[in-house]
Image (cartoon, helix red, strand yellow):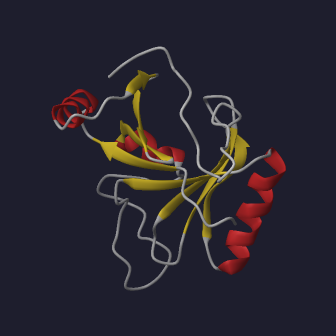
């Protein structure tokens, strides 16, 4: 796994409110398919529905939440997912397998997701959610960072 984070996704309870908040701070983003993307240096900050984000990571929210991978861990989904984009579908599979060997719990096996690219998810030993994805729509720069494409909308 290359040492980089490509997206930080915040699970929000009210997308319009969250978008307005970040707009009031001067952030300018692009809204697409019920998410808001902000370029933040060499990575992206994404706002997305909290329950949908949890489901995308193979986790549950609500009173019967996922207790995490081990004893003494905080229960439930923390509302944040880190994403690590890779350069191929095969890398998604290989990285999930490596994470599992290292002690991660796979919460969503690799598959083509609802948006049309291959992804999977795991939680680390402390319950932090990671999505591993090959999204050809987010090309890499030479330094491994990403630049968001123009989605054709503003937030």
Quarter of the view holding residue 26: top left
Q: Is residue 83 above or below residue 17?
A: below
Place of residue 75 in the rendered image (x, y in percent of width and height, measured from the top left): 34, 69
Q: Which of 13 and 6 lies nearest the eye of the viewer?
A: 6
Of all residues, the one furthest to the right in this rendering is 90
Quarter of the view holding residue 154: top left
Q: Quadrant of the C terminus?
A: top left
**Residue 107 located left or right of residue 82:** right
Q: Which of 66 and 113 lies nearest the eye of the viewer?
A: 113
Place of residue 142 in the rendered image (x, y in percent of width and height, measured from the top left): 69, 48
Q: Is residue 12 above or below residue 108?
A: above
Q: Quadrant of the N terminus?
A: bottom right
Taking the spot 54% from the left edge, 59% from the top edge, the residue there is: 130
**Residue 72 located left or right of residue 111:** left
Taking the spot 55% from the left edge, 50% from the top edge, the residue there is: 6
Q: Is residue 81 above or below residue 154?
A: below
Taking the spot 35% from the left edge, 63% from the top edge, the residue there is: 76
Q: Is residue 6 above or below residue 137?
A: below
**Residue 87 located left or right of residue 83:** right
Of all residues, the one furthest to the top in this rendering is 152
Of all residues, the one furthest to the bottom in this rendering is 72
* Residue 34 in sight from this viewpoint: no
* Residue 135 in sight from this viewpoint: yes
Place of residue 71 in the rendered image (x, y in percent of width and height, measured from the top left): 43, 85
Place of residue 126 in the rendered image (x, y in percent of width and height, measured from the top left): 45, 76
**Residue 21 located left or right of residue 38:** left
What number of labels is visible? 0
């Amino acid at each position: 796994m290359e040492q980089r984070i490509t997206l930080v996704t915040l699970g929000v309870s009210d997308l319009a409110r969250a978008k307005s908040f970040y707009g009031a701070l001067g952030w300018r983003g692009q809204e697409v398919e019920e998410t808001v993307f902000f370029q933040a240096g060499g990575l992206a900050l994404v706002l997305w529905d909290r329950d949908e984000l949890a489901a995308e990571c193979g986790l549950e929210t609500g009173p019967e939440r996922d207790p995490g991978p081990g004893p003494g861990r905080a229960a439930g989904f923390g509302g944040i997912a880190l994403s690590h984009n890779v350069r191929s579908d095969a890398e998604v599979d290989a990285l999930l397998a490596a994470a599992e060997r290292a002690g991660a719990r796979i919460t969503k096996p690799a598959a083509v997701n609802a948006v049309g690219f291959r992804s999977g998810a795991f939680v680390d030993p402390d319950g932090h959610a990671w999505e591993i994805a090959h999204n050809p729509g987010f090309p890499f720069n030479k330094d491994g960072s990403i630049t968001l494409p123009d989605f054709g909308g503003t937030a």
